Image (spheres, rainbow, N blue to C red):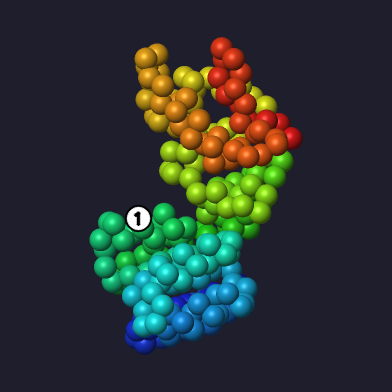
Amino acid sequence: MKVLLVEDEKKISDFVVKGLREQGYVVELAEDGNDGFVHATTQSYDVVILDIMLPGRDGLSILKSLRKEGNTVPVILVTARSELDERLEGLNMGADDYLTKPFYLDELVARIQALHRRSSGQSLSLMQVEDLIVNLTTREVKRGEDSIDLTTREFNLLEYLIRSPGRVLTRTQILEQVWGYDFDPSTNVVDVCVQRLRKKVDAGRDLQLIETVRGAGYRMRKS
């Protein structure tokens, strides 16, 4: 496995590089964010270990650019800080895992191996109906050449629909699976969210993918 480590603290980078190479990994080191970004965008890696606080480009900026360009390489974010907001921001940007310094090498190795097993089945996380492609790992959505920005709720709804193309899903099922609570017949949150999703996925398209089944619910068109 080929690993890119982007880390500016020499003590940590020496420790990680030495330890991973002893485990049989091929490790390349970038000691600042600019160099790390060049490595990550011009070469192929199985995993990127990315410090957040870096000279030059910071880790979150690198991660954001990688995901925007459609690069789905597994990324483990590393930081000396443990603030929840920062962890959530990184994960929402498409990071696959998160480690807070100091950490044990064995833990890092275990997480690399877990990510590699997952990424080996990458095709299973790509779902497609017609020209709509949903990446369940990076949470990226594209319709043809157009990227679609969705809220968390909209994405969860789209994921639920696209997992069962052609199957009619009732409002009760959608509410339970996407919102996580029992059906209230007086609520219209499902219909509102479906309409918002349609505006982003189907608006201006000749082929409408999200269909209404009158008196029953909604379904994703089957290719």
Residue 206 relative to residue 81: left or right: right
- Left or right of 180 on screen, residue 120: right
| 194 is higher (above) or lower (below) than 92 | above
The x, y position of residue 103, in whole percent, is 34, 70
x, y (%) of residue 62?
46, 71
**Camera-nearest residue between 139 and 149:** 149
Q: Amino acid at mark 1?
A: Leu
Left/right of residue 215 with respect to residue 176 in the rendered view: right
Identify the residue at horizontal 57%, vertical 32% (top origin): 161
Residue 144 spot, x, y in % from top left: 67, 49
**Residue 74: percent from left, percent from top:** 53, 63
**Residue situated in front as seen by the camera: 144 or 85:** 144
Residue shown at the point (62%, 73%) measured from the top left = 44
**Label 1 secondary element:** helix
Q: Is residue 179 visible?
A: yes
**Which residue occupies 36% across, 65% down?**
99
Q: In the orientation shown, which residue stands out farthest toward the front?
A: 204
Q: Which residue is disc 1 drawn over? A: 88
Say which quadrant the C terminus sits in: top right
Which quarter of the figure has residue 1?
A: bottom right
Q: Residues within 10 Å of mark 1 (few under 14, many from 20)?
A: few
| Quadrant assignment, res 56 | bottom left
